[in-house]
Image (spheres, rainbow, N blue to C red):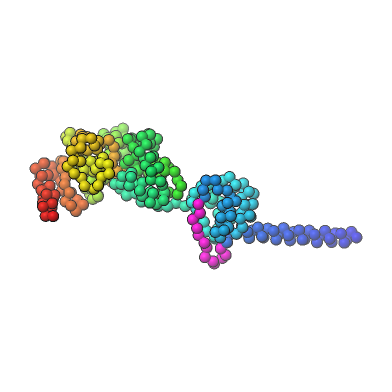
Amino acid sequence: MIKRALIGLLVLGAVAIAGAAGAWLWLDRALSPVAENGSEPHIMAFQVDPGDSFWHVSATLESAGIIRNARVARWFAQSEDLASKLKIGEYELSSDQSTPEIFEALTRGRVQTHPVVIPEGLRATEIADRLAAAGLADRDRFLEVVFDPASPARYGVEGPTLEGYLFPDTYRFARGVPEGRIAQAMVSEFLRVYHDLVPDPSSSNLTMREHTTLASIVEKETGAAHERPLIAAVFLNRIKRGMRLETDPTVIYGIKNFDGNIKRIHLLDGSNPYNTYKIKGLPPGPIASAGRDALRAILEPADTPYIFFVSRNDGTHIFAETYREHAANVDEFQRKRRRRR
């Protein structure tokens, strides 16, 4: 009897071990990648929204063919204490990832990012348009941050707004990032470049606001890199002589709903605070986002007496020291051009 009982116990133990081994293999299989070796994986963009649970996420991923078993996935999340650690955002997930690998990405916030290019010379409204077109920000909410009077102090720049401090560069942002964080990233890049160029602002003759405003005007006046130091010299020379800047881009910035055609009435409008044909000195603030070269040009202007320039109509300008020379240049490149039309 004892011998038979012992044999029975051994058989039961073997069955239990075999069952446990089988259960382990089943669990391991349930958590393994859906894509078999050599098969083409399925890749999808997956969005985790506020309030999403691991059960909802697991069911959606199983339905999409990204994981094998939502119930096992839920059990795994509970056993690893992941239930409250989901990070909101967009993820790129693949069926060649195991369930633990996918959940690690979702709980560590390894979100998908998207590039957006911000060229030199854009206004804040144009930057907002680009962000909205890329699906990275709500245009109106972004502009609320930019034009909030409290934003300059909050982000460490000199107002009146964040206009001019959204540094032109190529950025990568995840969808769903708050507009304030996007603005902060751009302003932080401006500050990095500015302090690289001006390590000791207290030793500069210009405040950050004055420097950035002048650089933004230079950026808008020319797209030719070699001209930036010349354009900067013209405006700095005019300031030293107490002359008005008389630059069209500032006037245009202050015109609401500008239709692309600057008129004499615009140049005579004394109510426009950006009308540098009427006001002396600099306008209230920057008119666009200047790049590094325009910011540097204010620090390293050309050594020249020029105080005038006019467009050659080919993207470059001709410069003059006296009004007489300037008038001749205007006649050559502007009036005669209009008469030939």
| Looking at the image, residue 242 lies above or below residue 22 | above
- Left or right: 312, with 198 as reference point: left
Which corner quadrant of the image does residue 165 belong to?
top left
Q: x, y percentage for residue 257?
A: 27, 44
Q: x, y percentage for residue 40?
A: 52, 65
Which corner quadrant of the image does residue 239 belong to?
top left
Q: Residue at x 31, y 38 (%)?
A: 198
Query: Can residue 37 be found in the magenta stretch?
Result: yes
Nearest to the observer: residue 131 or residue 24: 131
Q: Residue at x 39, y 49 (%)?
A: 132
| Looking at the image, residue 268 lies above or below residue 91 | above
Residue 258 visible from this viewpoint:
yes
Quarter holding the C terminus is: bottom left
Nearest to the observer: residue 200 or residue 140: 140
* Magenta portion: prevailing SS class: loop
Query: Can residue 135 be found in the magenta stretch?
Result: no
Which corner quadrant of the image does residue 161 belong to?
top left
Quarter holding the N terminus is: bottom right
Residue 170 visible from this viewpoint:
no
Nearest to the observer: residue 45 or residue 323: 45
Q: Residue at x 76, y 58 (%)?
A: 16
**Tally of numbered tags:** 0
Residue projecting furthest to the top: 202
Residue projecting furthest to the right: 1
Q: Residue at x 50, y 52 (%)?
A: 47
- Left or right: 132, with 45 as reference point: left
- Left or right: 106, with 126 as reference point: right
Q: Which stretch appears magenta?
A: 35-47
Q: x, y percentage for residue 166?
A: 35, 43
